[in-house]
Image (cartoon, rainbow, N blue to C red):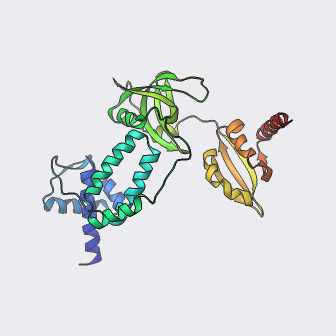
């Protein structure tokens, strides 16, 4: 059997698995995944049909497998099985308690179809991998925040939350139409249309004090979370700083969240360019932490802000 034949066999099996994993799969989606032409995908699907797989195809829609048809579970390689361990640790520590429990249940089902060698391989890894978030990313009093938000997005039904914004002294009740969730700067956010503000807003999950399902359908249709985030208005300020190369390497982990854009290498210094949302507070206070090894090139307003913060510190030390 030639290598081309083996590759085609593997691809056809993978296509079958993908068809079983989704209700509808587009031919272009398959072509992009396997980096082949649409013509090749059409031929592979005909091969599956010839083998007795009941595939339903609809022009302009995609492919689906007839309801009720299922093959026995597919065996996993040890490398695939090992990836489950990392996924389980991430789910336990970077999602809320409710979703973590559901994933644990799903993992037990996955492990049940593994061969003995793969089960042993997983067991040898499970207790040797630790993943811990750097801060609390959910309110422990609301263990099902992501679960409810996922349901709301899928079923297009409003949710009621008590939310404490960073400027507020106490939570306020909001009726939200969640569009999507995303993880950024180590926090989970939900982008939603807020009935109180009559606008799209981002809400951090650790500031949700209570969340409640409702039976009220969305009052309007919404674009995708990617489209809405691209259009979120934001007044950004260009910032350029020179940083000692000995210190610059320690800033790589945090600079992205500050709006880092590019860098230029000089002899002993690194010039960093940022597009910043909050120069006055977030960026200025971050800069102070290493300011004795750096210099501000622009804007002058940042220089004045840093001077003001240092003067206040000096006054408190007197």
Residue 155, placed above or below residue 93: above
Residue at position x 38%, y 37% in the image: 147
Q: Is residue 26 visible?
A: no
In the displayed structure, does residue 287 sit left or right of residue 112? Answer: right
* Quadrant in the picture for the C terminus: top right
In the displayed structure, does residue 309 sit left or right of residue 173? Answer: right
Q: Position of residue 138 (x, y in %)?
A: 49, 37
Q: Position of residue 33 (x, y in %)?
A: 35, 58
Of residues 305 and 51, the one drawn nearer to the viewer in this rendering: 305
Where residue 128 sits, quadrant-wise, is bottom left
User: Given the current orientation, which residue lies at the most extreme bottom position?
Assistant: 1
Of residues 276 and 185, the one drawn nearer to the viewer in this rendering: 185
In the displayed structure, does residue 298 sit left or right of residue 156? Answer: right
Residue 176, placed above or below residue 252: above
Q: Position of residue 49 (x, y in %)?
A: 16, 58
Residue 269, placed above or below residue 310: below
Q: Position of residue 211 (x, y in %)?
A: 42, 28
Of residues 64 and 257, the one drawn nearer to the viewer in this rendering: 257
User: Given the current orientation, which residue lies at the most extreme right position?
Assistant: 318
Residue 20, placed above or below residue 44: above
Of residues 30 and 13, the one drawn nearer to the viewer in this rendering: 13
Residue at position x 26%, y 56% in the image: 112
* Quadrant in the picture for the N terminus: bottom left
């Amino acid at each position: 059997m030639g290598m081309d034949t083996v590759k085609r066999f593997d691809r056809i099996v993978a296509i079958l698995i993908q068809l079983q994993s989704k209700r509808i799969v587009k031919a272009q989606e398959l072509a992009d995944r396997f980096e082949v032409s649409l013509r090749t995908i059409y031929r592979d699907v005909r091969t599956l049909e010839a083998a007795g797989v009941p595939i339903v195809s609809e022009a302009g829609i995609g492919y689906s497998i007839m309801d009720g048809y299922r093959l026995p579970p597919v065996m996993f390689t040890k490398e695939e099985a090992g990836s489950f361990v990392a996924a389980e640790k991430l789910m336990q520590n970077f999602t809320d308690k409710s979703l973590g429990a559901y994933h644990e249940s799903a993992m037990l089902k996955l492990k049940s179809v593994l061969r003995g060698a793969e089960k042993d391989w997983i067991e040898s890894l499970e207790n040797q991998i630790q993943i811990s978030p750097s801060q609390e990313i959910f309110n422990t009093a609301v263990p099902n925040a992501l679960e409810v938000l996922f349901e709301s997005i899928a079923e297009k039904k409003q949710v009621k939350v008590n939310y404490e914004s960073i400027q507020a002294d106490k939570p306020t009740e909001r009726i939200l139409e969640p569009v999507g969730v995303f993880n950024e700067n180590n926090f989970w956010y939900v982008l939603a249309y807020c009935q109180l503000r009559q606008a799209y807003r981002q809400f951090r999950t650790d500031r949700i004090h209570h969340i409640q399902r409702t039976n009220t359908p969305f009052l309007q249709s919404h674009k995708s979370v990617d489209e809405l985030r691209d259009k979120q208005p934001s007044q950004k300020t260009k910032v350029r700083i020179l940083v000692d190369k000995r210190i610059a390497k320690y800033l790589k982990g945090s600079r992205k969240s500050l709006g880092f854009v590019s860098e230029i290498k000089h002899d002993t210094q690194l010039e960093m360019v940022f597009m910043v949302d909050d120069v006055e507070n977030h960026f200025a206070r971050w800069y102070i932490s290493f300011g004795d090894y750096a210099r501000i090139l622009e804007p002058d307003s940042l220089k004045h802000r840093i001077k003001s913060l240092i003067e206040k510190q000096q006054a408190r030390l007197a």
